[in-house]
Image (spheres, rainbow, N blue to C red):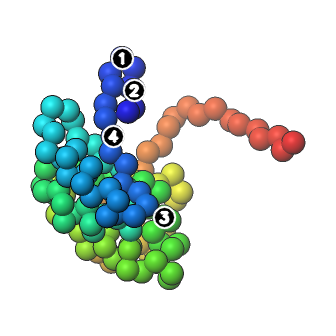
Amino acid sequence: MITFGDKRQTVFGLFGTYRDSEKELKEYIRDKSHVRKIMCTYDKLSKLTEVVNPSEYRLLIDEYHCLLKAYSYRQTAIDGVLENFRRYKSFCFMSATPIDATFCPNCLDDVKMITAEWEYTDKMKVNLL
């Protein structure tokens, strides 16, 4: 359960072994009494896509620069993300780490990149203990 101000929303977490969560996930999806939000690791997205109707969900890939860094040793899992993201109602690949366009996967070539720039920012100084 996550609380946003005075609103509470149920979020289903799909982590660990999929078969341990499959029954609960299907029950969560069938329950139309709440906004359905599901969090999962990128290696579970292909399994999630088999269970949900992707056209009913918006997909947010946070820290997507990690996909690029991990591709050499997590190719199958990351391919599952890159092969399925367009099946969703909408999608967003998000990262606060700047990524040069030359390093982005070719399948994202036609995806519009938006850079958020703030006019005023606070300067922060980190003191190591």
Residue at 27%, 66% (x, y): give it: 47
What residue is disc 3 on?
A: 65
Q: Name which quarter of the figure residue 107 lies in.
A: bottom left
Q: Earlier in the sequence, mark 2 or mark 4?
A: 2
Crowding at dot 2, Cα within 10 Å, few <14 / some 14-19 / many 20+, comes out as few
* Relative side of 6 to 99, left or right: left
Q: Between disc 1 and disc 3, whose residue precedes?
A: 1
Which circle, 3 or 2, is nearer the viewer?
2
Please say if the residues under marks 1 and 2 sit with CB atoms less than 8 Å apart. yes
Q: Amino acid at mark 1?
A: Asp
Q: Residue at x 48, y 64 (%)?
A: 65
Q: Secondary structure at mark 2?
A: strand
| Mark 3: secondary structure | helix
Q: Nearer the viewer, residue 31 or 19?
A: 19
Asked whether 43 or 81 is in front, the reply is 43
Q: Which is nearer the N-term, disc 3 or disc 2?
A: 2
Can residue 1 be seen?
yes
Looking at numbered disc 2 in the image, what kind of residue is underneath it?
A: Thr
Q: Amino acid at mark 3?
A: His
Q: Secondary structure at mark 1?
A: loop
Q: Would you name the residue on which mark 1 appears? A: 6
The three-letter code of the residue at mark 4 reads: Val
Q: Which mark is residue 11?
A: 4
Q: Residue at x 87, y 42 (%)?
A: 129
Answer whether labels 3 and 2 touch (C-beta < 8 Å): no
Q: Decide: few, some or many residues near mark 4? Use Cα within 10 Å; few <14, some 14-19, many ≥20.
A: some
Q: Is residue 25 left or right of residue 52?
A: right
